[in-house]
Amino acid sequence: MVALAAASLAGHVLQSLSLTGDAISESRQIHASISGTLKEHDDLERLTIDFKGLGGWVQASAGLAGFRREMTLHITVNLRSRIDVLNFQQTESFQALKDATKEGAQKILEALSDSRDHLVATTGSQTKQMRALHTHTETILSQEFKSAAANSKNRAKQPAPLRPKNNRAPGRRYLMPSLM
């Protein structure tokens, strides 16, 4: 805002310098004239009136600049107050989020601990069942091996059944004895 006021003031100064240069040029022409009156004299009078109006505008502009500063200050104070309120609300929100996250993490850890305990208990129970099944299987196999060994001994003690001898050589044809 200050930069805008400075640019406006600089523009007014340049315009004033331009008007002053024109006025000086016209004054020289009047002075150089023989009759002392020129057609441009009316233009000079008009420029003087414009210059007076410009002076009033500069005074009004200075009043507006003061009003602008007051408005800027008022807006700045209001914005700062709003920023402070939003900062406080944001801090409270972050604290609430932090607390909720902490509670959620605690619940998750408790659930994981409970799950771990359940898995350990289940694994222990299943391990006991597997050991019992393994022991039972070993017992059955041991009994089967003993039974098979006893059967094997019993067969070894019994005489072997007689089997007919086969004196035939492979690939050779024999005639029946009655035909000979």
Image (spheres, grey):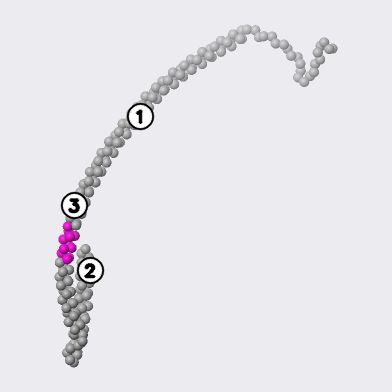
Q: Quadrant of the N terminus?
A: bottom left
Q: Can you see residue 24?
A: no
Q: Earlier in the sequence, mark 1 or mark 3?
A: 3
Q: Is residue 71 magenta?
A: yes
Amino acid at pointer 3: Ser
Find disc 2 in the rendering and name its residue. Answer: 7
**Residue 168, placed above or below residue 65:** above
Q: CA distance from mark 3 to mark 2?
A: 31 Å
Instruction: Looking at the picture, tell me which residue is in the foreground, 76 or 38.
Output: 38
Residue 101, percent across and down? Answer: 28, 38
Circle 1 residues within 10 Å: few <14, some 14–19, many ≥20: few
Residue at far right of view: 180
Amino acid at pointer 2: Ala
Check disc 2 and report its element: helix, strand or loop. helix
Nearer mark to the viewer, of 1 and 2: 2
Please give the range of residues in magenta: 64-74
**Residue 84, placed above or below residue 168:** below
Q: Residue 115: which numbered mark, if any?
A: 1
Check disc 3 and report its element: helix, strand or loop. helix
Residue 58, percent across and down? Answer: 17, 71
Q: CA distance from mark 1 to mark 2?
A: 74 Å
Q: Residue at x 79, y 19 (%)?
A: 172
Q: Is residue 79 magenta?
A: no
Find disc 3 in the rendering and name its residue. Answer: 81
Amino acid at pointer 1: Ser
Q: Earlier in the sequence, mark 1 or mark 2?
A: 2
